[in-house]
Amino acid sequence: MTTARAPSHSAGLVVALMLVTSAAAFGIFASADYQSSLMALAGIGVGALILYKPILGVLVLVLSIPVENIVWVAGQFTATRVLGVSVAMAWMLRKLVLKESWKPVISTSFFLASILLLAMIMASQLWAPAPLRVRSGTIQMVQMIVLGLLVIDVSGSWERLDLIIKALVVGALAAALMTQFQSATGAIRAGDEIAGGVNSTALVVLTIVPFGFYLFRSQQHTLWKLIGLGYVGVASLAVLQMLSRLNLLLLPLVVGGMVVASFRGRTARGWLVALLIGGTVGAIQFTPWEALSKRSETIIPYIMDTVAPTDRSQPMSGRGYHLRIGLEIAADHPIIGAGYNNYGVLFRDDYQFRVHRRDKLYRSSRSPHSSHIGMLADLGIIGASLWLFVLGTGLVAVIKVLRRTKSRPATPTYAMAQAIFAGLLLHIFAYGWYSPNQREKILWILLGLAVAASQLANGFGTANRELDLPTKTGSL
């Protein structure tokens, strides 16, 4: 990836200017909102830091994503979003000031697919009934794409990929422990307002479970093995406590699949035994069995009412109805869609009055509850194909790494690729049908990790071109 260079005097000047700006910003914000002042300073500080060590800014950002909804700035933006904007701006400024190559970013299929999708989104303003919603959706999509590109660019070695994964696991461990606290106190439903709502928190926590397996399969230090092992146990319990139906179905598949992969990899089999014993004890002791039993009883009826309702005279499930309207919008706008991010207003103002079997009158703008169907409704066949192209670039990239390393299943690189692959499978084949996950930062991090790993496997990096992680972590 980009060749490491010592910060120049130009970079130092930029940092000095940012510090002066921070002093001015502090003076302005302090009189109005101390929290905004602190967050503005933190954002500028991280921005200055990334000019010298881009990977450090990314690590801080990644660490905050699983607990994004914990801290808000002025009640409008999450601290993670403010931090992300600061990191992205500082990263691009550094690239310009130090005249670093953009090749690691623009030479990827991921970049091409993302630019094409973004162009389609922006063009949809021309035919969307609510063009302002296209603009807000475009801004959000730009942020997601930049996040993926940022991960690709700063991941100059296997060591850095390893550090990003560790930051993800530590942040997700905090989210899982917060879920435990919420479950114990019963103040609100476990998992709410951590990485988002309950379903979003469960999505993030479960997505990162394969990386817990990676840690105790690959690390030289016992502490990281214990963190990985502990995360798998705590996260599994957190998913059970959040009672998110899809994630309850996916949990045994994810854990079971990773156990089999780890066993076949001939690594950490003793740790697997410890996980099974500890997990069994923890499940018996802390699982809310009564609530879980009641929730489980609703899963099959809910699925049937969503995809194959038996009584067509009765209202559909809420999720099924939202998906059906998405398909109706797509049928009316099959080629180019109705306009990005316009599903919600079309649902509220038009289609709920035309499509029968709603369960209630919806007065607010709605979500399609699926990125795949949402893209089909908003951007038609063209846009949905571009969306699948973006996802496919990540999947193909990590499959290439798996093929290159399959003859050495005990290596850390193979374990890392398996974890990335498992996360992408979740998002493409499960969450893509269940939630508008193009808005989920964890998905774009996974895509960035996949592409970065593929580049490293092809020898495109500044250091550590071997496929095995070193015994000791090198410099950043």
Image: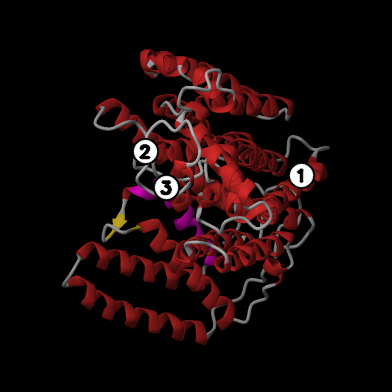
Q: CA distance from mark 2 to mark 1?
A: 45 Å
Q: What's the residue type where badge 1 is placed?
A: Ile
Residue under label 2: 361
Q: Quadrant of the N terminus?
A: bottom right
The amino acid sitting under disc 3 is Arg
Q: CA distance from mark 3 to mark 1?
A: 41 Å
Query: Label 3 crowding class (10 Å Cα cut-off): few <14, some 14-19, many 20+?
Result: some
x and y, in percent, of residue 271 in the image? 58, 25
| In front: label 3 or label 1 | 3
Q: Which mark is residue 348?
A: 3
Residue 306 belongs to magenta span: no
* Residue span colored magenta: 54-69
Q: Secondary structure at mark 1?
A: helix
For residue 111, which quarter of the picture? bottom right
Mark 2 lies on a secondary structure that is loop
| Viewer-side residue, 147 vs 368 | 368
